[in-house]
């Protein structure tokens, strides 16, 4: 299905800049799509890479354009505890090694299995002692949407802790803590059940939840990421993976 979006800013803007700011593609990719005749505005094919879109106009990317943008796959994986998401030390298992045909979750028809030597970096990290949803991709637009400096995408976690839970501690976890000399953004923190919390963050500092809990004398004994923006694990078992669909990629970029 063709990508369609109506421009709702107050002032005209170059098409390539708007598409990049919207997280659809990079400026260079947008310029190439225009050169290939795959971008139209209000039914007219855009021929000038410097073309500006006006308020109220509707831009459409042809099916071939979205296919090009989806050419770099993104993989959603349920990372088990003990697997590392970053560059592994000797003897450690990197998450990318789980991307095998045997671990593929769902319909395998038409799915290209990554080669064992492929370098597929994580899009945001999940430390060795944590488990749950992890994205692996070389798609720079996806990476910018999830972990870029302007990203406001929600990441949701289920966290089991040891220690006394008080309302004062919960309020500090929600807002009022600092890490590395910088104030943390407000977080949504709720009690799910006895010693289990739900965290929703809009940033990703190094080992953030564990360090936040340390500051209020709570010890994390299990950390499970269940959602990144509109993407959730669903019923995918630990150690399994699947490629992101075109619709999911578009939803992720739109949410960001």
Image: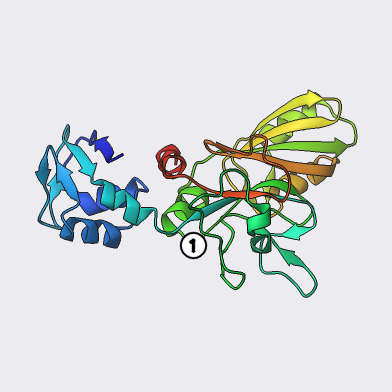
Q: Quadrant of residue 10?
A: top left
x, y percent for residue 26:
33, 57
SS type, badge 1: loop
x, y percent for residue 91:
80, 72
Report crowding for label 1: few under 14, some 14 to 19, many 20 or more residues within 10 A (C-alpha).
Answer: some
Residue drawn at 59 percent across, 40 percent down? 185
Seen as rendered, the residue at the extreme right is 163
In depth, the one of 124 and 116 nearer the eye is 116
Residue drawn at 72 percent across, 51 percent down? 239
Q: Quadrant of residue 53?
A: top left
Residue drawn at 60 percent across, 43 percent down? 106
Q: Is residue 200 left or right of residue 24?
A: right
Q: Which residue is mark 1?
A: 138
In depth, the one of 250 and 7 nearer the eye is 250
Residue drawn at 27 percent across, 46 percent down? 63
x, y percent for residue 248:
46, 41
Q: Quadrant of residue 97?
A: bottom right
């Amino acid at each position: 299905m063709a990508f369609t979006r109506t421009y709702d800013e107050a002032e005209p803007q170059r098409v390539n800049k708007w598409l990049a700011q919207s997280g659809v593609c990079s400026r260079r990719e947008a310029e190439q799509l225009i050169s290939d005749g795959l971008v139209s505005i209000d039914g007219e094919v855009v021929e000038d890479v410097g073309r500006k879109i006006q308020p109220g106009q509707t831009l459409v990317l042809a099916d071939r354009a979205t296919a090009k943008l989806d050419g770099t796959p993104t993989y959603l994986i349920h990372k088990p505890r003990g697997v590392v998401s970053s560059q592994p030390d000797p003897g450690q298992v990197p998450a990318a090694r789980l991307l095998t045909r045997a671990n593929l979750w769902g319909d395998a028809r038409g799915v290209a299995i990554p080669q064992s030597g492929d370098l597929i970096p994580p899009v945001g990290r999940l430390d060795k002692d944590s488990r749950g949803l992890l994205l692996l991709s070389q798609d720079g637009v996806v990476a910018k949407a999830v972990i870029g400096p302007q990203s406001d995408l929600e990441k949701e976690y289920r966290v089991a802790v040891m220690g006394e839970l008080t309302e004062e501690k919960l309020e500090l976890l929600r807002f009022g803590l600092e890490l590395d000399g910088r104030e943390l953004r407000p977080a949504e923190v709720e009690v799910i059940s006895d010693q289990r919390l739900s965290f929703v963050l809009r940033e990703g500092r190094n080992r953030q939840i564990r360090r936040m809990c340390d500051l209020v004398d709570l010890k994390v004994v299990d950390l499970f990421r269940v959602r990144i923006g509109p993407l959730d694990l669903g019923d995918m078992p630990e150690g399994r993976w699947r490629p992101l669909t075109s619709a999911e990629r578009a939803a992720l970029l739109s949410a960001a």
